[in-house]
Protein backbone atom coordinates (compact mmCIF):
# COMPACT_ATOMS: atom_id res chain seq x y z
CA UNK A 1 0.00 0.00 0.00
CA UNK A 2 1.39 3.39 -0.81
CA UNK A 3 1.12 6.61 1.18
CA UNK A 4 -0.92 9.40 -0.37
CA UNK A 5 -0.30 12.92 0.82
CA UNK A 6 -3.40 15.08 1.35
CA UNK A 7 -3.05 18.83 1.74
CA UNK A 8 -5.72 20.29 3.92
CA UNK A 9 -6.23 23.98 3.40
CA UNK A 10 -7.85 25.65 6.37
CA UNK A 11 -9.15 29.17 5.76
CA UNK A 12 -7.42 31.76 3.63
CA UNK A 13 -3.68 32.36 3.58
CA UNK A 14 -1.65 35.54 3.36
CA UNK A 15 -1.21 34.86 -0.36
CA UNK A 16 -4.98 35.11 -0.80
CA UNK A 17 -5.01 38.63 0.59
CA UNK A 18 -3.79 40.44 -2.53
CA UNK A 19 -6.57 39.26 -4.88
CA UNK A 20 -9.20 39.74 -2.18
CA UNK A 21 -8.10 43.32 -1.44
CA UNK A 22 -7.78 44.09 -5.14
CA UNK A 23 -11.30 42.80 -5.78
CA UNK A 24 -12.78 44.84 -2.93
CA UNK A 25 -11.00 48.01 -4.09
CA UNK A 26 -12.17 47.44 -7.66
CA UNK A 27 -15.77 46.85 -6.60
CA UNK A 28 -15.63 49.96 -4.38
CA UNK A 29 -14.28 52.09 -7.22
CA UNK A 30 -16.87 50.81 -9.69
CA UNK A 31 -19.67 51.48 -7.19
CA UNK A 32 -18.34 54.96 -6.41
CA UNK A 33 -17.94 55.97 -10.05
CA UNK A 34 -21.27 54.37 -10.95
CA UNK A 35 -23.11 56.24 -8.20
CA UNK A 36 -21.48 59.52 -9.26
CA UNK A 37 -22.37 58.98 -12.93
CA UNK A 38 -25.95 58.03 -12.07
CA UNK A 39 -26.46 61.07 -9.83
CA UNK A 40 -25.06 63.33 -12.58
CA UNK A 41 -27.30 61.62 -15.11
CA UNK A 42 -30.28 62.17 -12.78
CA UNK A 43 -29.73 65.92 -12.96
CA UNK A 44 -29.31 65.78 -16.75
CA UNK A 45 -32.52 63.90 -17.51
CA UNK A 46 -34.69 65.64 -14.91
CA UNK A 47 -37.62 67.61 -16.27
CA UNK A 48 -37.83 71.21 -15.06
CA UNK A 49 -41.16 72.55 -13.84
CA UNK A 50 -42.25 76.07 -12.97
CA UNK A 51 -43.70 76.58 -9.53
CA UNK A 52 -45.41 79.53 -7.92
CA UNK A 53 -46.69 80.33 -4.49
CA UNK A 54 -48.93 83.37 -4.25
CA UNK A 55 -50.11 85.72 -1.52
CA UNK A 56 -48.12 84.36 1.40
CA UNK A 57 -46.93 86.17 4.50
CA UNK A 58 -43.22 86.42 5.35
CA UNK A 59 -43.50 87.53 8.99
CA UNK A 60 -42.21 84.16 10.26
CA UNK A 61 -38.80 84.76 8.66
CA UNK A 62 -38.85 81.47 6.73
CA UNK A 63 -41.26 79.72 4.40
CA UNK A 64 -41.24 76.18 3.06
CA UNK A 65 -42.49 76.10 -0.52
CA UNK A 66 -45.58 73.98 -1.12
CA UNK A 67 -43.91 71.94 -3.88
CA UNK A 68 -41.05 71.02 -1.50
CA UNK A 69 -43.08 68.00 -0.36
CA UNK A 70 -42.56 66.32 -3.76
CA UNK A 71 -40.13 63.39 -3.96
CA UNK A 72 -36.52 64.50 -4.60
CA UNK A 73 -37.62 68.14 -4.95
CA UNK A 74 -34.79 70.50 -5.93
CA UNK A 75 -34.82 74.16 -6.93
CA UNK A 76 -32.74 74.56 -10.08
CA UNK A 77 -32.81 78.31 -10.61
CA UNK A 78 -32.83 81.45 -8.46
CA UNK A 79 -36.40 82.14 -7.31
CA UNK A 80 -38.05 85.50 -7.97
CA UNK A 81 -39.85 87.20 -5.07
CA UNK A 82 -42.40 89.88 -5.94
CA UNK A 83 -44.42 92.07 -3.61
CA UNK A 84 -48.02 91.32 -4.63
CA UNK A 85 -49.18 94.82 -3.58
CA UNK A 86 -46.80 97.08 -5.52
CA UNK A 87 -44.99 94.65 -7.86
CA UNK A 88 -41.49 95.38 -6.51
CA UNK A 89 -38.93 92.59 -6.79
CA UNK A 90 -36.78 91.62 -3.79
CA UNK A 91 -33.40 89.88 -3.69
CA UNK A 92 -32.65 89.92 0.06
CA UNK A 93 -33.52 86.26 0.68
CA UNK A 94 -32.06 82.80 0.30
CA UNK A 95 -33.69 79.52 -0.68
CA UNK A 96 -32.15 76.11 -0.18
CA UNK A 97 -32.38 73.52 -2.94
CA UNK A 98 -34.86 71.67 -0.70
CA UNK A 99 -37.29 74.62 -0.82
CA UNK A 100 -36.87 76.45 2.50
CA UNK A 101 -36.66 80.20 1.97
CA UNK A 102 -35.27 82.62 4.56
CA UNK A 103 -36.39 86.22 4.23
CA UNK A 104 -34.22 89.28 4.78
CA UNK A 105 -35.08 91.89 7.43
CA UNK A 106 -36.53 94.34 4.88
CA UNK A 107 -38.95 91.68 3.59
CA UNK A 108 -40.03 90.68 7.11
CA UNK A 109 -40.49 94.36 8.07
CA UNK A 110 -43.12 95.03 5.38
CA UNK A 111 -44.77 91.62 5.70
CA UNK A 112 -47.44 92.93 8.10
CA UNK A 113 -48.82 95.12 5.31
CA UNK A 114 -47.97 93.23 2.14
CA UNK A 115 -48.18 89.69 0.80
CA UNK A 116 -45.66 88.17 -1.58
CA UNK A 117 -45.56 85.95 -4.66
CA UNK A 118 -42.61 83.72 -5.49
CA UNK A 119 -41.87 81.85 -8.70
CA UNK A 120 -39.16 79.24 -9.12
CA UNK A 121 -37.93 76.47 -11.38
CA UNK A 122 -37.62 73.00 -9.87
CA UNK A 123 -37.47 69.31 -10.68
CA UNK A 124 -38.60 66.21 -8.82
CA UNK A 125 -39.08 62.48 -9.32
CA UNK A 126 -42.49 62.19 -10.88
CA UNK A 127 -44.08 58.74 -10.96
CA UNK A 128 -42.81 56.38 -13.72
CA UNK A 129 -40.21 58.87 -14.90
CA UNK A 130 -36.53 58.36 -15.79
CA UNK A 131 -35.62 60.43 -12.71
CA UNK A 132 -37.51 58.06 -10.43
CA UNK A 133 -35.82 55.02 -12.02
CA UNK A 134 -32.36 56.51 -11.55
CA UNK A 135 -33.11 57.40 -7.93
CA UNK A 136 -34.27 53.83 -7.28
CA UNK A 137 -31.08 52.45 -8.86
CA UNK A 138 -28.85 54.81 -6.87
CA UNK A 139 -30.62 53.80 -3.65
CA UNK A 140 -30.16 50.10 -4.45
CA UNK A 141 -26.46 50.49 -5.24
CA UNK A 142 -25.88 52.60 -2.14
CA UNK A 143 -27.55 49.91 -0.04
CA UNK A 144 -25.24 47.30 -1.57
CA UNK A 145 -22.22 49.52 -0.91
CA UNK A 146 -23.08 49.47 2.80
CA UNK A 147 -22.20 45.74 2.82
CA UNK A 148 -18.61 46.27 1.63
CA UNK A 149 -17.37 46.98 5.17
CA UNK A 150 -18.90 43.72 6.39
CA UNK A 151 -17.38 41.78 3.48
CA UNK A 152 -13.93 43.23 4.27
CA UNK A 153 -14.23 42.18 7.93
CA UNK A 154 -15.24 38.64 6.94
CA UNK A 155 -12.31 38.33 4.52
CA UNK A 156 -9.88 39.67 7.15
CA UNK A 157 -11.24 37.19 9.69
CA UNK A 158 -10.87 34.33 7.18
CA UNK A 159 -7.24 35.28 6.54
CA UNK A 160 -6.42 35.50 10.24
CA UNK A 161 -8.20 32.21 10.90
CA UNK A 162 -6.37 30.57 7.99
CA UNK A 163 -2.97 31.73 9.26
CA UNK A 164 -3.72 30.54 12.79
CA UNK A 165 -5.06 27.15 11.69
CA UNK A 166 -2.23 26.52 9.25
CA UNK A 167 0.36 27.19 11.97
CA UNK A 168 -1.05 24.30 14.03
CA UNK A 169 -1.22 21.77 11.22
CA UNK A 170 2.34 21.63 9.87
CA UNK A 171 2.32 17.86 9.41
CA UNK A 172 0.67 16.41 6.34
CA UNK A 173 -1.88 13.70 6.76
CA UNK A 174 -1.23 10.44 5.01
CA UNK A 175 -3.42 7.47 4.22
Image (tube, rainbow, N blue to C red):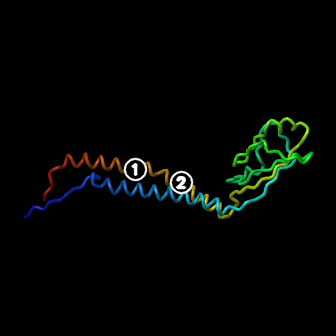
Between marks 2 and 1, how big is the CA–CA gap?
16 Å
State which tag comes first along the sequence, 2 or 1. Answer: 2
Q: Nearer the viewer, residue 89 or 166?
A: 89
- Residue at the location (37% across, 56% down)? 22
Is residue 116 depicted above or below 46 in this figure? above
Residue under numbered circle 1: 152
Would residue 125 appear left or right of 8 to someone viewing this image? right
Question: What is the quadrant of the C terminus in the image?
Answer: bottom left
Is residue 17 placed above or below 104 in the rendered structure? below
- SS state under label 2: helix
Circle 2 crowding by C-alpha within 10 Å: few under 14, some 14–19, many from 20: some
Who is closer to the viewer here, 45 or 93? 93
Give the quarter of the image for residue 60. top right
Residue at the left extreme, as displayed: 1
In the rendered image, the quadrant that contains the N terminus is bottom left
Say whether marks 2 and 1 touch (CB < 8 Å).
Answer: no
> x%, y% of residue 150?
43, 48
> Residue 19 occupies which quadrant of the picture?
bottom left
Counting from the top left corner in percent of width and height, residue 154 is at 38, 49
For the residue carrying disc 1, how many other residues have a C-alpha within 10 Å: few (<14), some (14-19), or many (20+)? some
> Which residue corresponds to mark 2?
142
Q: Residue at x 69, y 52 (%)?
A: 74
Residue 91: x and y, percent? 79, 45
Amino acid sequence: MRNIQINKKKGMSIGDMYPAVLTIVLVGMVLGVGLYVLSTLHTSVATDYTGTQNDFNTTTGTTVLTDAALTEFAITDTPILINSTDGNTFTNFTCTAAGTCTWGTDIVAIANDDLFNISYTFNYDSTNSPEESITTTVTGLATFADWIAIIVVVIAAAIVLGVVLSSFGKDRNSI
